Image (spheres, helix red, strand yellow):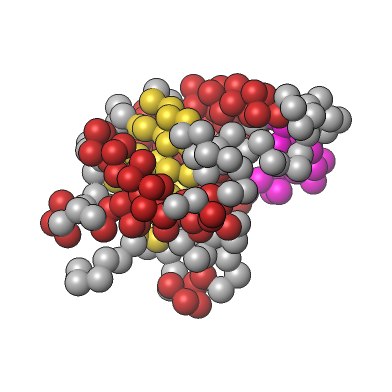
Amino acid sequence: MERHILVVFPHPDDEAFGVSGTLILHAENGTPITYACLTLGEMGRNMGKPPFANRETLPLIRKKELEEACKIIGINDLRLLGFRDKTIEFEDEEMLADRISAIIAETNPSLIITFYPGYSVHPDHNACGAAVIRAVERLPLEKRPTVHCVAFSKNCEQEIGHPDIIRDVSSVIDKKIAAIKAHRSQTEGLMQGAAKRGGDALTWLKTEAFWTYKWKGSN
């Protein structure tokens, strides 16, 4: 049972694919969850299938989709930080860490979930994770919350080892799929394709993997 969970990702739908099962399980146990989403994903290439969004309407559509996904997951505290999509790597590192540090100080989480810096493919993912680590490193070692990281680059297990946590979320898979489908502009084509291939195409969604970030000087 966690005291409070803080999720920090850069885009709407980042929370849905990799961690929503875990978050649903925590929410069902009564754990409060704060989600700090850095951008509205306004530079995303997907516009729905068939398209129903355009470059002007996409930010508002993705905001509404994110709010719906959060309702399904059980996230009652959504923070939209207002950064621009695909620019996180160019933001001032200390300023970004300052924003995250303020949320950490306010919410006092026992667990933070973010991307593993350097092992999460997208530059926004890696920059987001690095900012979270920078913010947490400002705290004394004994006061730092646990940080669970999501990683999926091809070389991640060779360089950082196997995941520390592999969680079976099959008991809440229907809610997880609903949260993914809430991001209709981004996932409709993917889910349609998976449905055509049959149920086995979605089995990968039933497990979620995390690496516990290891601090220098800790055991």
Closer-to-camera residue (137/16):
137
Residue found 54% across the figure and 60% down from its top:
120
Disc tally is 0
The picture places residue 16, in percent across and down from the top left corner, at 55, 39
Q: Describe residue 156's horizontal placement relative to residue 86 as left or right.
A: left
The picture places residue 96, in percent across and down from the top left corner, at 41, 47
The picture places residue 113, in percent across and down from the top left corner, at 39, 47
Q: Describe residue 120's horizontal placement relative to residue 42 as left or right.
A: left
Chain part drawn in magenta: 184-203
Q: Residue furthest right?
A: 50
Q: Is residue 32 visible?
A: yes
User: Up-down: is 9 above or below 157?
Assistant: above
Which quarter of the rendered picture does the N terminus lie within? top left
User: Up-down: is 132 above or below 198?
Assistant: below
Which quarter of the rendered picture does the C terminus lie within? bottom left
Residue found 26% across the figure and 34% down from its top:
107
Residue found 54% across the figure and 54% down from its top:
90
Q: Describe residue 181's horizontal placement relative to residue 125 as left or right.
A: right
